[in-house]
Each structure stands twice: as C-alpha cells, then as structure tokens.
C-alpha cells in the first residue's frame, strides 16, 4: 500500500521536470528572395505544403536548397 503513493510522487516529479514550455530551443527558417521575406517555418510546425512535421534536418535541407536558387536564408 505504501508503494502506490511513492510511485505516484515519482511519476509526477518525472513528468513535471521533463516537460518544458520553453520555445527558445526551436529552430526557425526565414528566407528572403529578391527583397521579399517569406513566412517563417519553425521546427515542430506542420509543413503547409506536405502536412509533415518540420524537423531540424528538413529545415537544414530547405535552407541549402533555397540558397542554391539564390535566396538568402537564416536558421535561428
């Protein structure tokens, strides 16, 4: 009987300590083509074209591809 409250306390402490609401660590891609800025695409968002979840790798590949075609992009 004593194990249940201890287990509950342990699970709650793990869940509260592992969840973070900070968005500071998310990467976002912003590109500018011929003076016009595009919409910002951030890690964890849903890609409006494909419906896939945006990952860090997808942002890096997109940045390289867009810069190859003359865009100026920043990944922050």
Image (cartoon, rainbow, N blue to C red):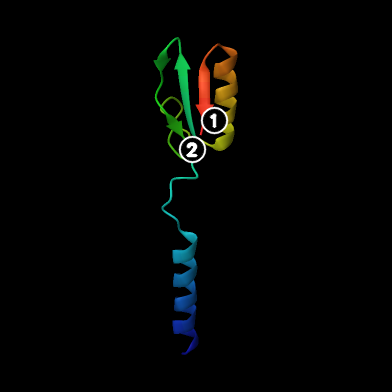
The residue carrying pointer 2 sits among few (fewer than 14), some (14 to 19) or many (20 or more) residues within 10 Å by Cα, namely: some
**Which is nearer the eye, 53 or 43?**
43
Where in the figure is residue 40, as x and y percent of width and height?
Answer: 42, 28
Residue at 41% across, 53% down: 21
Where in the figure is residue 43, as x and y percent of width and height?
Answer: 48, 38
Using the numbered discs, state the Cα–Cα distance from disc 2 to disc 1 in whole angstroms. 7 Å
Residue that numbered label 1 is attached to? 59
**Which is nearer the eye, 21 or 50?**
21
Query: Residue 43 has which mark?
Result: 2
The image quadrant that residue 62 belongs to is top right
Residue at 44% across, 30% down: 41
**Which is nearer the eye, 74 or 52?**
74
The image quadrant that residue 20 belongs to is bottom left
Residue, far top: 34
Q: What number of labels is visible?
A: 2
Residue at 59% across, 26% down: 61
From the viewer's perspective, tell me whether residue 64 is left or right of residue 4. Answer: right
Residue at 46% across, 58% down: 19
Secondary-structure class at tag 1: helix
Query: Residue 67 has which mark?
Result: none
42 in relation to 3, above or below: above
Secondary-structure class at tag 2: loop
Where in the figure is residue 33, as x and y percent of width and height?
Answer: 46, 13
| First along the sequence among labels 2 and 1 | 2
The residue carrying pointer 1 sits among few (fewer than 14), some (14 to 19) or many (20 or more) residues within 10 Å by Cα, namely: some
**Which is nearer the eye, 43 or 30?**
30
Q: Are marks 2 and 1 in contact (CB under 8 Å)?
A: yes
């Amino acid at each position: 009987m004593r194990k249940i409250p201890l287990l509950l306390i342990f699970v709650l402490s793990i869940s509260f300590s592992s969840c973070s609401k900070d968005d500071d660590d998310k990467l976002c891609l912003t590109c500018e083509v011929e003076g016009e800025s595009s919409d910002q695409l951030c890690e964890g968002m849903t890609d409006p074209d494909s419906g896939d979840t945006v990952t860090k790798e997808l942002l890096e590949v997109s940045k390289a591809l867009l810069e190859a075609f003359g865009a100026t992009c920043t990944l922050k």
